[in-house]
Image: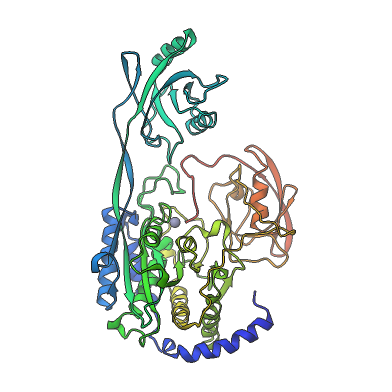
Amino acid sequence: MTTGKTMAFNRIALLIVLALTSCASQRAAISAGELRNHVSWLAADEQEGREAGTDAAARSAVYLRRHLDAAGLIPAGDNGTYFQYFDIAAPSLEGASTLMIGNDVFDVNTLSASPAQTHHAQLVFADADDVEDMIVLAKSDGEIRAEVREAAANGAVAIVLASDEFVAFDAVPGKLPIAVVLIDIKLYEKLTLDVFNGKVNVRLKADVQKQTKRARNVLALSPGISGEVITVGAHFDHLGWGGEGSLAPGTYAVHNGADDNASGTAVLLELAEMWGANRGGPVVANRGVLFCFWSAEEKGLLGSDYWVENPTIPLPRVLANVNLDMVGRVAESKITVGSASTGDCFGEPLAVMQAYYAANEIDFKLNIMKGSLPGGGGSDHMSFHKKSIPAIFFFSGLHSDYHKPSDDAHKLAYPQMAVLADGLAEFIASLQVVADGFEYHKPQAPVDEEGEVRHVKRANVWFGSIPDYGAEPLDGGMQLSGTSPGSPAEKAGLLGGDILKQVADVEIFDIYDFMDSLSTFNNGDTIGVKFLRDGEMKTTQLTFFPRPVGSAGRPH
Ligand SMILES: [Zn+2]
């Protein structure tokens, strides 16, 4: 929160900036109707959730290009086009995996998560004293990931896993550390006997054929005189029909991604049009603005990461990044601003944005966080941090539709999104002229009372809280914006607006305390949770149980 003293200081700077950017205030306001049109198109079932590398994502890219071209922006992708192409991993194909003992060759199966490798080594039981550089033999209890990790941790180079039931090629998501082949019980019994009777050397081949697909970023420039640019970005891809990033386990349905991130895409497209030569454009500014529609964010920030590694405008000319990811749930007229501390350059533009709302008597609140969201926020601004470029993040918060098929267009608050977009126009125009402050400051890591950096511990259990990142409860605590459906938190009766104060015997001052507390519990534990509801301290009992399978999730 800004103190009175810095406010007064900011106001002087603000007057100067307002004088410089008065043209910004004369731009036509962004309309809720146009935002709704863009989101409705992008998040329609026909666009199939815009998964990177699919035809649906390509259609969305063409939609963006059409609007950018009509607005008179300059293509800023590969070879004078709006697109920048890059390869992403596609689902692997199963090849012919084998296990050879002497001259006997056995057909075996593998997993898409296994590395494609061949090993020639001694076969030993997984619980042998020394398995270093050997291939281990084990019978699976169904916890394949844990079994493979354990063998790898013990130094094994590969694992032969037996299972009573057929295990599908794609049964284990993600990547496994060592090669895996799967065998049936009959072969397991034979191998068990062989290993029991003496030294057995085997040749193991896990044949996994990696595939790639092409994805594309969409890039458009509003040029400036100096050649320097401010990048403003939003990812337009989402989860397609579900898969690894989905929080709706076992569901095969279009994940529409209206808030995540058709909302940011629509706002960015309207801003880009505002800066386009055919729509009046800005009075040519000193610095240009590069509008970046990233793909494959959901697969690990791949589009923005590819761009910073292969920039279409040299990185020394890129002064700052503004990231819009999930900006549609703004019905309460507030937005969380993360990572503002990574550049002093953001101070004045944020003040300009607030002054614009104040001057027009618009009720819209910026919750400017002192540091970053936990984990940095997990979105495309982090690709710029990696290159020591200041990058700021606008985010309206998590909700119970996050990464589910129910993240639909009708749930967004379009009038308030338009208000946000108008304020962002002021923000960007200000960033085009702000004098300096483009030196990068590392995101502030959370520190404890002694000033030591706090590391977030991994939770053992699923709580099901949806934190309200924008809320900063006066006397500490972690405010919820809701709970995940079917979660322990929901079953315990917790609601959006509740402020968690104590979890078992751990007092909660902020989200880091909360995450730390979860590292000490196990499934089946029942604990007391103290929370404030409407100013009143309450207590409830919460019992941990496992999250349904297939709902592994990562923010954004
Ligand atoms: Zn997402």
User: Horizontal and vertical percent for residue 73?
Assistant: 29, 76
Q: How many marks?
A: 0
Across and down, in percent, residue 466 comes to: 57, 56
Viewer can see residue 485: yes
Look at 28% across and 75% down and name the residue there: 74
Would you say 162 lies left or right of 154 here? left
Instruction: Give above or below for 224 relative to 179.
Output: below
Quick one: quadrant of the N terminus? bottom right
Nearer-the-camera pick, 40 or 432: 432
Left or right relative to 389: residue 210 = left
Residue visible at 29% across and 49% down in the picture: 213
Q: Is residue 231 visible?
A: no
Which residue lies at the image location 43% right of the left edge and 58% below the top edge?
Answer: 407
Residue 263 lies in quadrant: bottom left
Q: Is residue 484 left or right of residue 108?
A: right
Q: Is residue 443 above or below residue 27?
A: above
Q: Is residue 87 left or right of residue 388?
A: left
Q: Nearer the viewer, residue 138 or 423?
A: 138
Ligand 1 located in image quadrant: bottom left
Q: How is the image coloured?
A: rainbow
Single out the residue that lies furthest toward the top. 197
Image quarter of residue 462: top right
Pick the residue in front: 240 or 150. 150
Residue 535: x %, y % from top left: 72, 65
> Horizontal and vertical percent for residue 130?
55, 21
